[in-house]
Image (cartoon, rainbow, N blue to C red):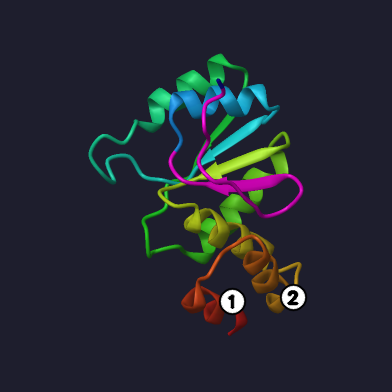
Amino acid sequence: MSHPLPAMRKITDDLSACAQLTQDDIKALSEQGVKTLICNRPDDEEPEQPSSASLKAYAEELGLQWFYLPVISGQVEDGQGDEFGQILAQAKTPIVAFCRSGARCGMLWALSQRKQQDPKALVDQLKVSGYDMPDFFARLMS
Protein backbone atom coordinates (compact mmCIF):
# COMPACT_ATOMS: atom_id res chain seq x y z
CA MET A 1 0.00 0.00 0.00
CA SER A 2 1.41 3.38 -0.95
CA HIS A 3 2.04 6.11 1.59
CA PRO A 4 -0.53 8.97 1.43
CA LEU A 5 1.32 12.20 0.67
CA PRO A 6 0.27 15.64 1.87
CA ALA A 7 -1.94 17.43 -0.67
CA MET A 8 0.19 18.92 -3.44
CA ARG A 9 -0.44 22.32 -4.99
CA LYS A 10 0.98 22.36 -8.51
CA ILE A 11 2.35 25.88 -9.02
CA THR A 12 4.18 25.28 -12.31
CA ASP A 13 4.98 22.22 -14.39
CA ASP A 14 8.23 21.84 -12.40
CA LEU A 15 7.22 23.08 -8.92
CA SER A 16 4.68 21.84 -6.40
CA ALA A 17 4.19 22.90 -2.78
CA CYS A 18 2.79 21.10 0.23
CA ALA A 19 2.68 20.90 4.01
CA GLN A 20 5.38 19.44 6.28
CA LEU A 21 7.04 16.32 4.90
CA THR A 22 8.11 13.23 6.82
CA GLN A 23 10.75 10.67 5.88
CA ASP A 24 7.99 8.43 4.49
CA ASP A 25 6.77 11.32 2.31
CA ILE A 26 10.30 11.95 1.06
CA LYS A 27 10.72 8.29 0.14
CA ALA A 28 7.39 8.31 -1.74
CA LEU A 29 8.28 11.54 -3.58
CA SER A 30 11.66 10.09 -4.54
CA GLU A 31 9.91 7.02 -5.94
CA GLN A 32 7.63 9.34 -7.95
CA GLY A 33 10.65 10.99 -9.57
CA VAL A 34 10.94 14.21 -7.56
CA LYS A 35 14.54 15.44 -7.80
CA THR A 36 14.68 18.42 -5.40
CA LEU A 37 13.16 19.41 -2.06
CA ILE A 38 13.06 22.95 -0.69
CA CYS A 39 12.31 23.31 3.01
CA ASN A 40 10.87 26.74 3.83
CA ARG A 41 9.97 25.91 7.41
CA PRO A 42 12.20 26.96 10.31
CA ASP A 43 13.12 24.22 12.77
CA ASP A 44 11.14 24.03 16.02
CA GLU A 45 8.10 25.87 14.66
CA GLU A 46 6.00 23.31 16.51
CA PRO A 47 6.65 20.28 18.73
CA GLU A 48 7.15 16.93 16.99
CA GLN A 49 8.23 18.60 13.75
CA PRO A 50 11.10 16.64 12.16
CA SER A 51 14.36 18.59 12.06
CA SER A 52 15.50 19.92 8.72
CA ALA A 53 18.90 18.28 9.28
CA SER A 54 17.36 14.82 9.69
CA LEU A 55 15.16 15.27 6.60
CA LYS A 56 18.09 16.63 4.60
CA ALA A 57 20.26 13.64 5.49
CA TYR A 58 17.52 11.24 4.47
CA ALA A 59 16.71 13.10 1.23
CA GLU A 60 20.38 13.17 0.23
CA GLU A 61 20.68 9.46 1.06
CA LEU A 62 17.96 8.92 -1.56
CA GLY A 63 19.82 11.09 -4.09
CA LEU A 64 17.60 14.16 -3.84
CA GLN A 65 18.85 17.74 -3.93
CA TRP A 66 18.00 19.60 -0.71
CA PHE A 67 17.73 23.33 -0.09
CA TYR A 68 16.90 25.00 3.23
CA LEU A 69 15.42 28.50 3.10
CA PRO A 70 13.62 28.96 6.43
CA VAL A 71 10.96 31.66 6.41
CA ILE A 72 9.00 32.75 9.48
CA SER A 73 5.25 32.48 8.97
CA GLY A 74 3.70 35.88 8.29
CA GLN A 75 7.12 37.45 7.62
CA VAL A 76 7.88 36.53 4.01
CA GLU A 77 10.30 39.14 2.64
CA ASP A 78 10.98 40.14 -0.96
CA GLY A 79 14.66 39.20 -0.59
CA GLN A 80 13.66 35.68 0.41
CA GLY A 81 11.69 35.47 -2.83
CA ASP A 82 14.87 36.40 -4.69
CA GLU A 83 16.74 33.62 -2.84
CA PHE A 84 13.96 31.18 -3.73
CA GLY A 85 14.38 32.17 -7.39
CA GLN A 86 18.13 31.48 -7.17
CA ILE A 87 17.35 28.03 -5.77
CA LEU A 88 14.86 27.34 -8.58
CA ALA A 89 17.46 28.36 -11.17
CA GLN A 90 19.87 25.63 -10.00
CA ALA A 91 17.47 22.94 -8.82
CA LYS A 92 16.86 19.71 -10.70
CA THR A 93 13.20 19.25 -11.60
CA PRO A 94 10.61 18.28 -10.58
CA ILE A 95 10.77 20.23 -7.31
CA VAL A 96 8.64 20.07 -4.18
CA ALA A 97 8.78 22.94 -1.69
CA PHE A 98 7.23 22.61 1.75
CA CYS A 99 6.46 24.50 4.95
CA ARG A 100 3.65 24.10 7.52
CA SER A 101 0.82 24.46 4.99
CA GLY A 102 2.51 25.24 1.66
CA ALA A 103 1.46 28.91 1.74
CA ARG A 104 4.93 30.36 2.30
CA CYS A 105 6.20 28.32 -0.64
CA GLY A 106 3.58 29.85 -2.94
CA MET A 107 4.44 33.34 -1.73
CA LEU A 108 8.15 32.76 -2.27
CA TRP A 109 7.54 31.49 -5.80
CA ALA A 110 5.43 34.55 -6.67
CA LEU A 111 8.04 36.91 -5.20
CA SER A 112 10.76 35.11 -7.17
CA GLN A 113 8.82 35.77 -10.40
CA ARG A 114 7.66 39.34 -9.75
CA LYS A 115 10.34 40.97 -11.92
CA GLN A 116 9.59 38.77 -14.95
CA GLN A 117 5.82 38.35 -14.80
CA ASP A 118 2.76 40.53 -14.52
CA PRO A 119 1.47 40.62 -10.91
CA LYS A 120 -2.06 39.73 -12.00
CA ALA A 121 -0.74 36.65 -13.82
CA LEU A 122 1.07 35.60 -10.64
CA VAL A 123 -2.08 36.03 -8.55
CA ASP A 124 -4.11 34.10 -11.13
CA GLN A 125 -1.55 31.27 -11.14
CA LEU A 126 -1.62 31.03 -7.35
CA LYS A 127 -5.43 30.96 -7.37
CA VAL A 128 -5.41 28.16 -9.96
CA SER A 129 -2.98 26.31 -7.68
CA GLY A 130 -5.49 26.54 -4.83
CA TYR A 131 -4.15 29.49 -2.86
CA ASP A 132 -6.49 32.01 -1.23
CA MET A 133 -4.28 34.75 0.25
CA PRO A 134 -6.02 38.12 -0.24
CA ASP A 135 -3.49 40.12 1.80
CA PHE A 136 -0.55 38.66 -0.12
CA PHE A 137 -2.36 39.09 -3.45
CA ALA A 138 -2.86 42.79 -2.61
CA ARG A 139 0.85 43.06 -1.77
CA LEU A 140 1.79 41.56 -5.14
CA MET A 141 -0.56 43.93 -7.00
CA SER A 142 0.72 47.09 -5.28
Residue located at (69% from left, 72% from top): 124
Q: Which mark identifies residue 98?
A: none
Q: Quadrant of residue 1?
A: top right
Q: Residue furthest front?
A: 1
Q: Please state the total of marks drawn on the protein image.
A: 2
Residue located at (50% from left, 78% from top): 134
Q: Residue furthest top?
A: 61
Q: Earlier in the sequence, mark 2 or mark 1?
A: 2
The amino acid type found where label 2 is placed reads Asp
* Residue 89 or residue 13, whichever sits in front: 13
Q: Residue furthest bottom?
A: 142
Quarter the C terminus occupies: bottom right
Residue located at (47% from left, 78% from top): 135
Would you name the residue on which mark 2 appears?
118
Location of residue 5 in the rendering, given as x and y in whole percent from the top left corner: 53, 35
Label 2 – label 1 distance at C-alpha: 9 Å
Is 16 colored magenta in this rendering? yes
The amino acid type found where label 1 is placed reads Leu
Q: Does residue 74 appear left or right of residue 82 in this picture?
A: left
Q: What range of the chain is rendered magenta?
A: 2-20
Is 55 colored magenta in this rendering? no
Question: Can you say whether 22 is above or below 133 in the image?
Answer: above
Say which element carries label 1: helix
Q: Which mark identifies residue 140?
A: 1
Say which element carries label 2: loop
How crowded pointer 2 is (Cα within 10 Å; few <14, some 14-19, many 20+) is rated as few
Location of residue 17 in the rendering, given as x and y in whole percent from the top left corner: 57, 48
